[in-house]
Amino acid sequence: MRRKLGCIFLLCVFLTFSGITHAERLYFSVSVQADVITASARVRYAGDRPYISLGDLLGDVGGAVNVTPERLLANYAGVTAALHDNGVAVAAPGVTFSLIYPARAQNGDVFISRADVTDFFAHAFDTRVVEAEQARPLPELTPIVPPADPLTDEDPELPLDIPDPPEEVAPDVVEPELQPIDPEAEVEPEPEPETPPEPAAPTPATPGVFNVIMLDPGHGGQDIGSAMDDTFREKEFTLDMAVRMQRMLAENTEMNISLTREEDKDLSQSMRATAANTARAELLISIHAAYAPSPNAAGVTLFTDQPPPVRSGMSQEARRDLDDRRIRGEQAATVAYHIAQHIADENALGTVTVRAAPLLLQRHADMPCIVMEVGYFSNPETAPAWTEEEYREQAATTLTLAIADALHAMAEESQ
């Protein structure tokens, strides 16, 4: 009889704490040192209460969970927090606290309630985690085999004076098909019937705040950048994306948008910066794709400048130049964080990260500079989408909306 009652109890627990679909996920912005990373997690329900996979969240930022018969362990940044199945107590080095709702263990993972996520990370790991607005899902991609001998940039004057981005673990998610954008969602129809409507319109920027933008398509000419194969190379990809973004920004905002190059030609970093300086641009955005050693690296990375420290014996003029560069780097970081948040809100391009590193462009440019790596050609799951024109148009729309809305929000904050 006891065995029968035990089976009934376990069945009730299973029915009570079961997931609705593997495709339903929630997205969170995680502050990791100077970076803001977008992490996602599966949703399960205990009754009508949503629970979040702690394993998914920690996995996206380099942590992990470990389920033992005695305890549920959450490990992150060298810190281990101990929980208990169906318990609310949490113990971490130097602190103990309670969850609002009991933690749950299921299939080797740990789930905590949606309401507990922010406080759990704050108390256990001293890490800021906030839920991002949910929007469009990631596109469905067809895997390809990465090139055996990818073409890499061997030019001594590289566009980025930065280390390779760290390996990121791709989330285990079944991604739904990309949905088309409603052409009338945020913009009035075009007055001329013969002109097709744009997919979506960015919010017009407030005049006077970053109103002159220079887009820089990375690479060009002999410098092909990275490559997916012999027919799809970074230099053509960046120009294609920049032209799309210029068109959308120019047609749907009041900003003055220029390109450092409009054709396939060689440009040094100083020439790109000179073009932006001559146009009196207030913001320079250099567009790139990425190629990482890990096939799991994905998403969007925004790099802002990190000037070298002041050294003893430097002249006053050199100190002033470094100070000006530091100010421009801080301004670029503010813009980048706003753009990253808007991209993350769309949930359409994967993990979004903001990093600081010395930028060659910023040595010559007189304005804040952001280097935007919008995808990884080395990822066999996500790379094929970039070869499709429809996906590039969708991605350009997402990036354009993020840039325009971020600048608009900053303009409103400054008033």
Image (spheres, rainbow, N blue to C red):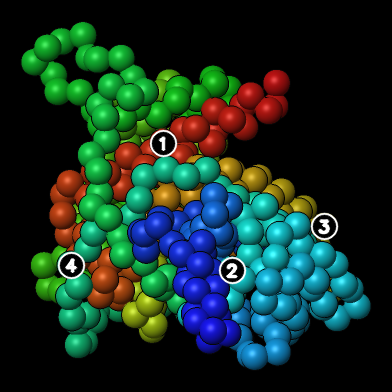
Q: Nearer the viewer, residue 43 or 385?
A: 43
Image height check: is 223 above or below 302? below
Write down the residue under mark 3.
316
Nearest to N terminus: mark 2 or mark 3? 2
Residue type at mark 3 is Gln
Write down the residue under mark 2.
111
Which tag is nearer the camera, tag 2 or tag 3?
2
Residue type at mark 1 is Leu
Q: CA distance from mark 2 to mark 4?
A: 31 Å
Q: Secondary structure at mark 4?
A: loop
Q: CA distance from mark 3 to mark 1?
A: 41 Å
Write down the residue under mark 4.
142
The residue shown at (82%, 77%) is 91
The residue shown at (21%, 87%) is 149
Nearest to N terminus: mark 3 or mark 1? 3
Residue 54 x %, y %: 59, 70
Q: Is residue 183 visible?
A: yes
- Based on the displayed image, in which of its 4 quarters is residue 265 positioned? bottom left
Label pair 1/2, CB-CB below 8 angstroms: no
Write down the residue under mark 1.
401
